[in-house]
Amino acid sequence: KICIKGKHAESIRALEAACQNERNISVFILNDYYPAGDEQQLVYDVTGRIVPVGGIPIDAGAVVQNVSTLKNIALAQQDIPVTHKRLTVTGEVAHPVTIDAPLGMSFRDCIALAGGPVDEEGYGLICGGPMMGYVEKNWDNVVTKTTGGLIVLKKDHPHFLRKAAPQSFNRNLAKSVCCQCMRCTELCPRNAIGLGVKPHLAMRAAAYGSEYKDNGLFSCCNCGVCSFYACPFGLTPSAIMTEAKMALAQSGVKPQKRTPDGAHPFREYGKVPVHRLIARLGLKKYDVPAPLLREELHPGQVRIPLKMHIGAPSECVVSVGQQVSVGDRIAKAPEGKLGVDIHASINGTVRAINANEIVIG
């Protein structure tokens, strides 16, 4: 199944035409809710099966791949390595744009392409989406294989202020404000498919200064619905859940794989419409097209990290002063360890090498 939201009518027509003569490939239309792209929501929407607590889609007989991964698999079959990352730059910029950024290109250079502010004064940066993305304080950091997008907001924007709040502030609010209304748990997408994710109990534990230990914690995906949509007081249960989940993992507790009996009967009525979510976040004015910039980008310099993947950092195989071209291998996976090869993303000269990155310019 190729899953796509129904609002993308033009893309759906193209996909259905391409699948017309395919026996085992078809298009599945999704509702426009958040987080429809969560792999466990997808598995349930498409198959009616539930991924067990602490499990992954294969435990339910399914495999979920995003478009970017499938594209890179197809390129790998042609011996074309990953050298660029497609991402959107939006927010407080003159012309939002989607670009194929060479790996190692600085966030600052990406923002400049969209006509964004030249410095951080008065502005903040969210790397990723507005819900699951993180606040990035260093605009000179670079695009990696996992960069999801760049959102520039004014530092006094309410959503940015909430994203940037320190964890100590979040804990103090949980202690002083949470009234245990349970809205966070009622609207949790993972709880709605029966996975026992209960943010209100994590908030209760935080209020009393105790540890929250529950198997359902392992199914929290930090989607942010509890914090940025459900809570009537603007609290951040997702931050409390993440902290509790990390503490549980660090203590050596492993998830117990349990498949629930079924989804909540009111799941359909608890889905969060994307247009309402955007309005709630105060981001409606930024919900505009970000057309693809089709020209190749040639930044003056890239700083390619040696670790932007699971496993061990890659080992450099080039030397300072060496000429490289796009696609040339510049680092290899360490022998006998999990890792990947890394390739040059621009044509140029290796300017510097250290334990963390290779600089090409």
Image: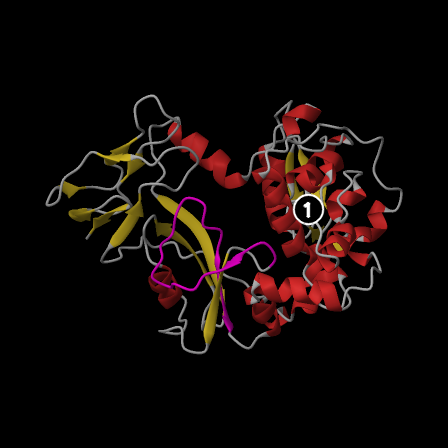
Residue located 22% across and 49% down the image: 359
Tell me if 18 is positioned left or right of 300 in this view: right
Residue 274 in sight here:
no
Label 1 element class: loop
Q: Is residue 78 left or right of residue 232?
A: left
How many neighbours does mark 1 have within 10 angstroms: few (below 14), some (14-19), or many (20 or more)? many
Q: Which of the pair 166/84 is nearer the observer?
A: 166
On the image, the x and y values in percent for residue 194 come to 80, 38
Against 358, is 136 above or below? below
23 or 97, which is in the foreground?
97
Instruction: Please tell me whether residue 129 is drawn above or below residue 308 in the rendered image.
Output: below
The span shown in magenta is: 131-154
Does 160 appear in magenta? no
Residue 143, magenta (yes or no): yes
Q: Report the residue at 80% width, 44% height from top.
A: 192
Mark 1 highlights which residue?
36
Query: In which image quadrant can residue 329 be found?
Result: top left
- Foreground: 276 or 294? 276
Q: Main secondary structure of the magenta part?
A: loop
Question: From the image, which quarter does the N terminus lie in?
Answer: top right
